[in-house]
Image (cartoon, rainbow, N blue to C red):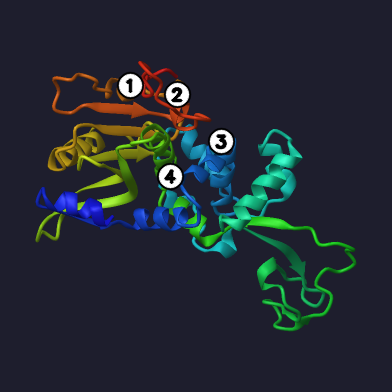
Amino acid sequence: MLTARIAAGCRGLELNESEPGRAGRVAVTSFLDLRELHYLAHAPLLEFLEEMAAHTGISFYKRRQQQQGQTIEPSEVVARTIDDLPEKSMNDFKRVLGNNQDAAKSWLLWAERRGLIVKGFPLLCEKCGSKQWIPVAAFAPPIICRGCAAGMETPFGDRPTAEFKYRLSERTRRVYEHDAMGYLMAMRFFHFIFGGSFGSELVGFHPGIEVRLKGNADAEGEADVLMLLTGGDLIPMEVKHSFTGMTDEEVEKLDRLATRLRSPWSALIVSKYGKDATADFVARENRSLDSDQFRLILTYDLLLSERPFWSLGGDPFLWAP
């Protein structure tokens, strides 16, 4: 961030972290490095985590809105607190990961260690019948019932064992609240492409950056992901959850921002597969070297590649749904 601010300062600009950027940065700091984002590059798993971020019982409303072609704001469906989040079992994760129990165990252990999810168990008060969910880290008898404020002497009833459930952590909930998971997937992809070799020109990334003219309170634009290269180039990227969200207005904003940053190119990214892309989105790609707005388009087809790489004579950004 310091280096990017210096590079922007040479252009008479100031960089500041946005709220979505803060959510993305906090999530990334829990990883050992960006390569660990590989554990999230799985479309069914990402869809499942998105469901876990929603209010309990919101799935029907969300499906209906999508069927009607309406754009859904994350604030409409994402739970406002972790207490409102649904809880899932290991069998749910096993189903999402191809009915592979070893994969589910391994992923849950990694996610718990990195603070993406929280393991806990549901409890039932025998006095008032109130239900509550307790994280394993917070389990310390006596448990006080939130319903009647009495001590729960037998919180597990007659069950011989505790059945663990999983919820998203607060940092992961905030990523979905600000629709920033696509930012992390974009960072992962470009990290593989530009940072995977000796002598790499990649300095780093930052999600969610507001760009202002020096001394100006109004933002000139916002990059969902900003990439910095060793030559001082700042590359802005626009990331959307759906193709309908990638409107002419959003593309124009990115083009204006790229001009302000003197960027050699920019990228439009949608967190869906290319087979569902609209003709308008495909037409937004601009590979003309004579153009002032060289622009890439990317979808899950490339973003979730198991091992993205730039082969000799190859094109790692080729549009091939």
Q: Residues within 10 Å of mark 3 (few under 14, many from 20)?
A: some
Q: Quadrant of the N terminus?
A: bottom left
Q: Residues within 10 Å of mark 1 (few under 14, many from 20)?
A: some
Q: Position of residue 55 (x, y in %)?
A: 55, 54
- The residue under the point 65% across, 46% down is 107
Compute the Cα span from label 3 to label 4: 13 Å
Residue identified by numbered label 4: 184
In the picture provided, is 88 more to the left or to the right than 234?
right
Residue identified by numbered label 1: 282
Q: Is residue 70 visible?
A: no
Q: Secondary structure at mark 1?
A: helix
What number of labels is visible? 4
Q: Amino acid at mark 3?
A: His
Which is more toward the observer, 250 or 258?
Answer: 258
Q: Secondary structure at mark 4?
A: helix
Q: Mark 3 or mark 4: name the one nearer the start of the chain.
A: 3
Compute the Cα span from label 2 to label 4: 21 Å
Residue identified by numbered label 3: 42
Q: Amino acid at mark 1?
A: Val
Q: Amino acid at mark 2?
A: Asp
Compute the Cα span from label 4 to label 1: 22 Å
Which is more toward the observer, 283 or 316?
Answer: 316
Q: Secondary structure at mark 3?
A: loop
In the picture provided, is 141 more to the left or to the right than 109?
right
Residue identified by numbered label 2: 276
